[in-house]
Amino acid sequence: MLRIHQIQVLTDNYVYVITESKSKITACVDPSVFDDIENFLDKNNLKLDYILNTHHHNDHVGGNLKLKNKYGCKIIGSMNDQDRIPGIDIKLKENDSFLIGKSAFKIIDTPGHTNGHICFYFEEDQVLFSGDTLFSLGCGRLFEGTYKDMVSSLLKIKSLSSKTKIYCGHEYTLNNAKFCKKYDSENKDLQKKIEKIEKLRENGIPTVPTTLKEELECNIFLRAKDVKTFSKLRDFKDNF
Ligand code: ZN
Ligand code: FE
């Protein structure tokens, strides 16, 4: 079983430190920075065995090399992005499995935000680290991929168990909610979700993780019925 610690860094980034309970093997998902992660690990008496990178953007890999230097951890990323992930050691491709102690994850290729973007799916733990592909009530901007790429990446995520907990890279939920509300104003599930997240944010509590079930009900980008609708929404959102 995984224990997941959520660390907020920079303005709105989430870094996750995961420890497998039996073996105490520890990994860090998308370490944007070094200092906050080092503090956390030292305070909790943890060593770092692996870094898992969803994609090459600096707000996800910024702490890679310093952490590797201090802890000698191995860095795991996409085979397709081996030239852009600093310090990469283990290059994985779609459907590859890997063990963190007794917990297995699988690689899901999710091009769109960047061409080499991947998500880490822990099937037994029902956990997905979605990076900047799927956010709560939103999805990543298309810096490199096409609309079609992103739609098929989101389709892969939609096919997972609806109980899956989604741990994404940013706390963008409140702003995403305003956008969803504008274009999906009759959605009762969305209205309920917005009340919930407004309360959380008022109290400074993260809205992440979310669940795939809630996203299927409320996230307008997951609900878009075809690529054309998705493209329009993505364009509107870029100028929102
Ligand atoms: Zn990014
Ligand atoms: Fe990011």
Image: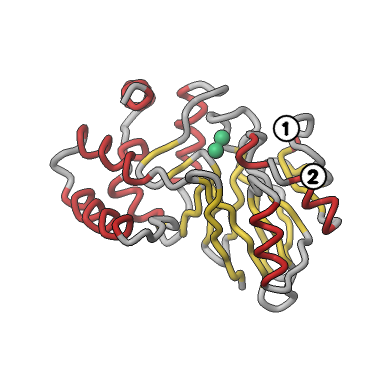
> Residue 209: x percent and y percent?
44, 58
Tell me if 48 is positioned left or right of 124 in this view. right
> Residue 155: x percent and y percent?
45, 39
Task: Tell me the number on the disc at residue 81.
Answer: 1
Residue 36 vertical placement versus 238 (above, below): below
Ligand 1 quadrant?
Answer: top right
SS type, badge 1: helix
- Looking at the image, which residue is at 46% across and 48% down? 159
Mark 1 or mark 2: whose residue is earlier in sequence: 2
- According to the picture, the residue beneath numbered tag 2 turns out to be 65
Amino acid carrying mark 2 in the image: Leu
Residue 227 vertical placement versus 35 (above, below): above
Q: The N terminus lies in which quarter of the figure?
A: bottom right
SS type, badge 2: helix
- Looking at the image, which residue is at 65% across and 35% down? 58
Residue sitting nearer the eye, 130 or 30 = 30
Task: Tell me the number on the disc at residue 142.
Answer: none
Residue 22 vertical placement versus 69 (above, below): below
